[in-house]
Amino acid sequence: QVHPVESGGGLVQAGGSLRLSCAASGSIFSINAMGWYRQAPGKQRELVAIFANGGTTSYADSVKGRFTISRDNAKNTAYLQMNSLKPEDTAVYYCNCVSGGRIFWGQGTQVTVSS
C-alpha cells in the first residue's frame, strides 16, 4: 500500500498563489508517476498535472502557464505550485501515485479562491 497525503490547501484571493505538497509513504518500491487532480462541487474529477518517471510532465489546458508540478524522488513527494489563481480553480485537490501497476489516492485538500 502507498499512502499519499496532501497538504497546503487553503483560502486565497484571486491572483494569489498556493503550493500543494503530496508526500507518499508506505510500501514504496517505485513510483512511476505522481499526479494532481481536482474536483469542484457538482463536477467530475479532472486531471490537473502529472509528473512521470523521466521528468515528463503534462498539464490540463486550463492551468498551463499558471501551475507547475515538480517532484522530489528522494522524498517521494510531489508539489503543485499554483500561481495566478482564479475562482474557477476552487476545488478539492487530490494527489495520486502510480506504483506497482496500482493507483493510490490521497484524501484531498481544499483550495478556495475568492474573487
Image (cartoon, grey):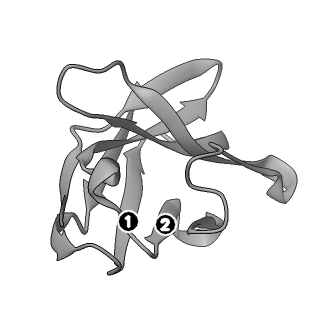
Single out the residue that lies furthest toward the front: 115
Mark 2, Cα crowd under 10 Å, few <14 / some 14-19 / many 20+, is many
Single out the residue that lies furthest toward the bottom: 16
- The residue positioned 44% from the left and 75% from the top of the image is 84
Horizontal placement of 84 versus 14: left or right?
A: right
Count of labels in the image:
2
Question: Looking at the picture, does residue 54 appear above or below residue 26?
Answer: below
- Per the image, label 2 sits on a secondary structure element best described as strand
Q: Amino acid at mark 1?
A: Ser
Pick whichever, 9 or 63, lies toward us: 63
Residue at numbered disc 1: 21
- Label 2–label 1 contact, CB within 8 A: yes
For residue 30, say whether it is visible. no
Mark 1, Cα crowd under 10 Å, few <14 / some 14-19 / many 20+, is many
Where, by quadrant of the figure, is residue 114 drawn?
Answer: bottom left
Horizontal placement of 37 versus 14: left or right?
A: right
The spot of residue 4 in percent (x, y) is 36, 45
Residue at numbered disc 2: 79
Where's the N terminus, which quadrant? top left
- The residue positioned 57% from the left and 68% from the top of the image is 66
* Residue 81 image label: none
Distance Cα–Cα, label 2 vs label 1? 5 Å
If you read the primary sequence from the N terminus, does the residue marked by circle 2 or circle 1 appear first? 1
The spot of residue 94 in percent (x, y) is 34, 41
The spot of residue 96 in percent (x, y) is 46, 37
- The residue positioned 39% from the left and 59% from the top of the image is 23
The spot of residue 100 in percent (x, y) is 64, 24
For residue 17, say whether it is visible. yes
Q: Amino acid at mark 2?
A: Tyr
